[in-house]
Image: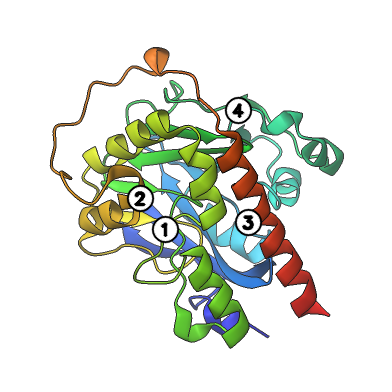
Amino acid sequence: MTDHISYPPLNTPKQVADGVWIVDAAPVHAGGIPLPIRMTVLRLAGGELLLHSPIPYRPSLQRALEALGRIEHFVAPSVGHWMFLRDWQAACPNAVTWAVPGLADRGQVRRSGVRIDAELTDRPPRVWADEIDQVLVTGPVFKEVCLFHRPSRTLLLTDLVINLEGDLLPVGPRTLARLLGIVAPDGKAPLYLRLLLRTNHRAAKEAAWRLVAFNPDRVIFTHGQWFNRDATRQLRRSLSWLLGTTGLERRLPEFSGSHVAPPRTSTLLVGAALVSVLVVFVVGRRRRR
């Protein structure tokens, strides 16, 4: 059992700001590493709830959330954070499911029966545009949409920062997590994801500057110890592989989603990234035997 690496109480909404709750769940296993998972819940001005990166469905959790507001929006914020949607959709059939571009076209998603109602881009949909800003981060085979809740100054990420507590991990997974660069207090995007995003470096760096420019009071992400204090500084540190280690206070360049240059892929970097993914997969299989 690895439940001890999560953050109890589990499957229970915990308020962290006005209109913002987190719900931690038992870990999942990915590539040989147990990953604690977390859903964030935002209550919009009209009282409706937005569930960011839903965790496994439980009737008791649904009841607890409905005591806070109406469940009207599910967000699948990255290519890997949709796995638990089907049960939530069955329980809340009138809720709208939003996802990163292209998720609905993936074979695994189609076979799962998960319904995608609309895609999220750099521009927030009208339904929450007055409260939430969005930044879309893209690379080969990877997309993540980051949400900034303006009323609470809360930034929501998924895999762009993973910050596992090494002391809670078994020795083998801890070593692998350190190799991937996802152990607190130095957690960041895992190595293979950093390599993939470097193939789209200009656009990814622009997106990172936009995230820092929000100057969030807190940064909540799906895996590990989130940034509850000195959040902007910690975010800069975690994104320094994109931003660089100096000049972090420079003026944010103008951004227009329509003017971002198309990604320039590097065969070498993509190959290295795929090798990293393969290594993680192979190590994970060996440890499970």
Residue drawn at the location 46% of the way across and 40% of the way down: 198
Answer with mark 4 or mark 1, whichever residue precedes in sequence.
Answer: 4
Label 4, label 2: how far apart the Cα atoms are: 25 Å
Q: Label 3 belongs to which residue? A: 276
* Mark sitting on residue 188: 1
Q: Label 2 belongs to which residue? A: 241
Answer with mark 3 or mark 4, whichever residue precedes in sequence.
Answer: 4
Label 3, label 2: how far apart the Cα atoms are: 17 Å
Answer with mark 2 or mark 1, whichever residue precedes in sequence.
Answer: 1
Residue drawn at the location 21% of the way across and 56% of the way down: 233
Q: Are marks 4 and 2 in contact (CB under 8 Å)?
A: no
- Observer-side mark, 4 or 2, equals 2
- Observer-side mark, 4 or 1, equals 1
Q: Are marks 2 and 1 in contact (CB under 8 Å)?
A: yes
Q: Are marks 4 and 1 in contact (CB under 8 Å)?
A: no
Few, some or many residues within 10 Å of mark 1 (<14, 14–19, 20+): many
